[in-house]
Amino acid sequence: DVKVTQSSRYLVKRTGEKVFLECVQDMDHENMFWYRQDPGLGLRLIYFSYDVKMKEKGDIPEGYSVSREKKERFSLILESASTNQTSMYLCASNQRDPTDTQYFGPGTRLTVL
Amino acid sequence: AQSVAQPEDQVNVAEGNPLTVKCTYSVSGNPYLFWYVQYPNRGLQFLLKYITGDNLVKGSYGFEAEFNKSQTSFHLKKPSALVSDSALYFCAVRDTALYSSASKIIFGSGTRLSIRP
């Protein structure tokens, strides 16, 4: 079974802190994604990566950055957390084949106080 | 631009009755269409997908969906609902006319399905 893991299920941070969210997949997938999920808005793509050290902005990249130094690991960084970044963050991965489904991690619920 | 719409925020069905969760899409080329389900405090799980071929697609947990090109729809259906089907359902689409290095897809806003005993 494909497994996508995220470093924390719940995280509480203060405004202005630097926040790291880690995602690891064990299926040698080329593509990895970071989404945020908010009620009524569905999933919105923050960043994605199609190869090591490669990244592309999604629909809402402002206030975020990412890092992919190894194929299995994709990190989301909030440089200076703000209260409007309180959300559920979901990581996903899949193969380069555009018909392949995305496999999701369990999510990290981040609260910024 | 590609987009996907789930017109109902919530669908309520009695156990044993058939259920339908609606999804419509807009793409430039041919669509790849997906349904995912999310149980409380969990990530999304894949249910089924349409890539090509037969318009009726069968998936996990007894769900199926019908691709209708003329109506640009991909509604999720199940003949007999279970209480355990209660969850949040997401439709997603990828436009094959758009070039991308990754298989970027667009998700709908989600429909909460509630099955009453």
Image: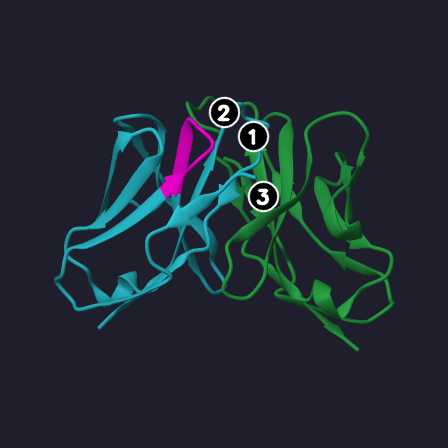
Q: Quadrant of residue A9?
A: bottom left
- Circle 2 — which element? loop
The residue where tag 2 is placed is: B98
Q: Quadrant of residue A11?
A: bottom left
Q: Is mark 2 in CB contact (under 8 Å) with mark 3?
A: no
- Circle 1 — which element? strand
Stretch in magenta: A24-33
- Circle 3 — which element? strand
Question: Vertically, is A26 above or below A42?
Answer: above
Percent coordinates x, y for residue B115 in the rendering: 74, 71
- In the shown orientation, is residue A92 left or right of residue A81? right
The residue where tag 1 is placed is: B95
The residue where tag 3 is placed is: B92
Question: Vertically, is B90 above or below B100?
Answer: below
> What amino acid is at disc 1?
Asp
Chain shaded cyan: A
The colour chain B appears in is green
